[in-house]
Amino acid sequence: MMDFKDNKVLIKCLQQNNKKAFSFLVDSYHHRLCVYANSLVNNSMLADDIVQNVFINVWEKRNMLNPGHSLKSFLYKSVYNEFIDQYRKSQSLLRIEKKYIEHLNTIVAGEDEESTKKLISDVKNMMEDLPPKCKQVFMLSKKEGLTNIEISEHLEISVKAVEAQITRGFKILRKKLSDKVKPVLFILFNRRYIEKKY
């Protein structure tokens, strides 16, 4: 019986059109890649689409796989590339955003599934602990994607008050979050804010 856990064996079998090897690949990585993709897009259905596209591409280009390279790293990088391709279709990618996305890619590719879940959970839990007014404004901005003017009108407060609460939220989170978690915060929520601004 073939040892599909061996990177070289698995790639060789894929190149030989071994469907059992492909099934093993999907079973082994589908869930963890979906977790990673969802950390990028914050949309489980879109994340699943990204991962499916990656697996389809792997099967179609299986003869081009390099047995000397880590298949795990290749899969994570492929998910990242698919995300970037889809993101670029909807809007331009700022340099600062690319830096954060690449950093997140490096982090997650080296982590196991549980560590990835913990990173995202830490961010969300800390946001829940923000002061009430700060949390309300911050979530409307970062999660709902409202502009400062829209938040101002919705809450009947000044735009300056909105900006002050968002700045406060970032400062609180930046003090609490490790370097590993900061990129997750940036990716999970609205990308209009650049780190140096807060």
Image (cartoon, rainbow, N blue to C red):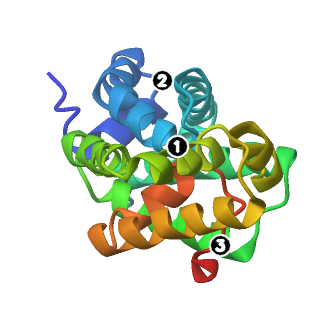
Mark 2 is surrounded, within 10 Å at the Cα level, by few (under 14), some (14 to 19) or many (20 or more) other residues, namely some
Q: Nearer the viewer, residue 48 or 190?
A: 190
Q: Which of label 1 and label 3 is nearer to you?
A: 1
> SS at mark 2?
loop
- Residue shown at the point (21%, 48%) measured from the top left: 115
Image depth: mark 1 or mark 2 in front: 1
* Discs 3, 2 touching: Cβ within 8 Å: no
Sequence-wise, the earlier of marks 1 and 3 is 1
Q: Real-space Cα distance between discs 1 and 2?
A: 53 Å
Three-letter amino acid code of the residue under disc 1 = Gln
Q: Is residue 164 left or right of residue 3?
A: right
Residue at mark 3: 194
Picture residue at 62% right of the left edge, 34% below the top: 57
| Disc number placed over residue 136 in the picture, else none | 1
Residue 12 percent location from the top left of the image: 37, 39
User: Which residue bears the numbered disc 2?
Assistant: 17
Tell me the crowding category of disc 3: few under 14, some 14 to 19, or many 20 or more residues within 10 angstroms, Cα based: few
Quarter of the image for residue 163 reads bottom right
